[in-house]
Image (spheres, grey):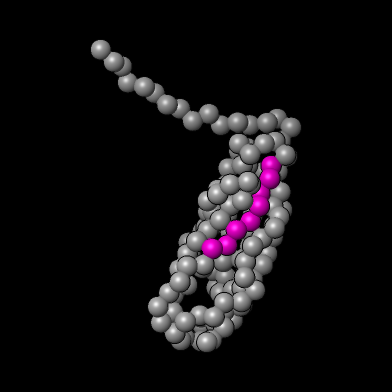
Amino acid sequence: MFSNIINKNLVVVNTSNQPPVLSNPVLPDSIVRPPSGSFDLTISITSIDPDGHCDINTVFFDAYRPNGQHIGVGIIPMTYTNNNVYSFTAPVIGSTADSTFGYFKYVFQAFDNSNALSNIISDSIKFVRP
């Protein structure tokens, strides 16, 4: 007879905690938005925690339209790929509306298991007409 296995996540918290450090954002300077169709855009950033990779809880970003309007609901989490790099991929959807062109702002940040926030890195992508 076998019993159920209980799995419990173990959160690592360091009493002399240091926040994560973000660097090396990888975004294109500009993108030609097609009038129709779509293609995938991947953005990435490096996040290192002095207390070890296991202490990083979430790497995320906020995105803003050229008019300053927030995109999405809350923060947008990124996925760990490898070598301290986190990425996010989403489709760039074709459009001819004026509001879909211009500089879109991306604000990156991370927090660790003690909720210590990293530095903030801001960057932008200019969406242009074909």
Q: Residue at x 54, y 53 (%)?
A: 78
Q: Residue at x 68, y 64 (%)?
A: 122
Q: Which residues are magenta?
A: 42-49
The location of residue 15, given as percent across then percent down, is 70, 30
Name the side, left or right, on which 128 lies relative to 4: right
- For the N terminus, the quadrant is top left
Closest to the observer, 11 or 33: 33
The location of residue 41, given as percent across then percent down, is 52, 67
Closest to the observer, 28 or 71: 28
Closest to the observer, 74 or 92: 92
Res 16 → quadrant: top right
Residue 39 visible somewhere in the drawing: yes
The residue most toward the front is 83
The location of residue 8, given as percent across then percent down, is 45, 27
Q: Is residue 14 above or below residue 83?
A: above
The residue most toward the left is 1
Residue 66 visible somewhere in the drawing: no
Closest to the observer, 72 or 89: 89
